Image (cartoon, rainbow, N blue to C red):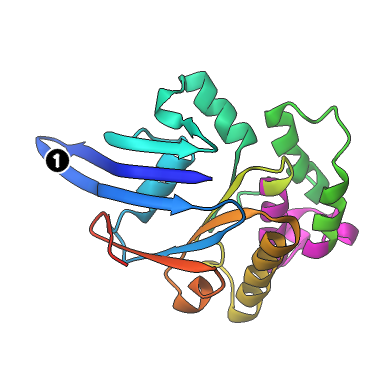
Amino acid sequence: MIEIRNLRKIYKQGDVDVFALRGVDLDVAEGEFLSIVGPSGSGKSTLFNILGGLTPPTDGTVQIGGRDIMQLTDAQRTDLRKQAVGFVFQKYNLLPTLTVNDNIEIARHIAGTHDKPRESWFADALKLLGLESKLGRKPRQLSGGEQQRVAIARAIVNRPSILLADEPTGNLDTENSDLVLGLLRDLNEKIGQTILMITHNPEAAAYGHRIVRMRDGRVVA
């Protein structure tokens, strides 16, 4: 699903070069649940931003589903974000004035699929996420764990090739963290969703099939 070779990212701070990634090589199989761990400044978020088409690398190649994202135009990278990549963040980023259903539908409007019926598999995903009875509620009527489940539903509604989860349990207590992580694992196992998750929590990382450790812009284990 993902092939990364010699990936480098250098940011400029005045006249100083800041090396965020220093030659990362990584393969991710279709249907894999991969956890990426490392201290602040290790390059995890930069790697995610590149995979999501949010920022270009300085050097190296990134192929997603056989497409080199560096060979894409800006418009094509935008389409990649709309259709092939789903994002889940530490902050739920739900619109407070909209219902759960409408927050989910935003992703379909952005991707241009809102005029088509939802695919049948998504009803199973909503049931798995425990959201069937909450579609008419507003975010303020939900717990933090429930809001994160809505964010996950929004991220997968267009059946992205890859789900990028950046500290998805960072704002949750232990009980809700375990629930959300279990749901991510269920989505991986039951609908085959490929997941890459950033986390500082070793217990959360253990939910993945494989753990990649980063430090100083490199994969070290």
Q: Please determine whether, in this image, residue 141 is positioned above or below residue 17.
A: below
Residue 97: tell me if it is visible.
Answer: no
Residue type highlighted by circle 1: Asp
Q: Which element is circle 1 on? A: strand
Tell me residue 5's x, y (percent): 33, 43
- Name the residue nearer the viewer: 183 or 170: 183
Q: Magenta region, mostly helix, strand or loop?
A: helix
- The part of the chain drawn in magenta is 128-155
Residue wearing tag 1: 17
Residue ID at (69%, 56%): 192
Residue ID at (66%, 54%): 193
Q: Please determine whether, in this image, residue 124 is positioned above or below residue 49.
A: below
Q: Is residue 219 magenta?
A: no
Q: Is residue 117 left or right of residue 169?
A: right
Residue ID at (33%, 50%): 25
Q: Please determine whether, in this image, residue 201 is positioned above or below residue 122.
A: below
Residue 204: tell me if it is visible.
Answer: yes
Tell me residue 7's x, y (percent): 30, 42
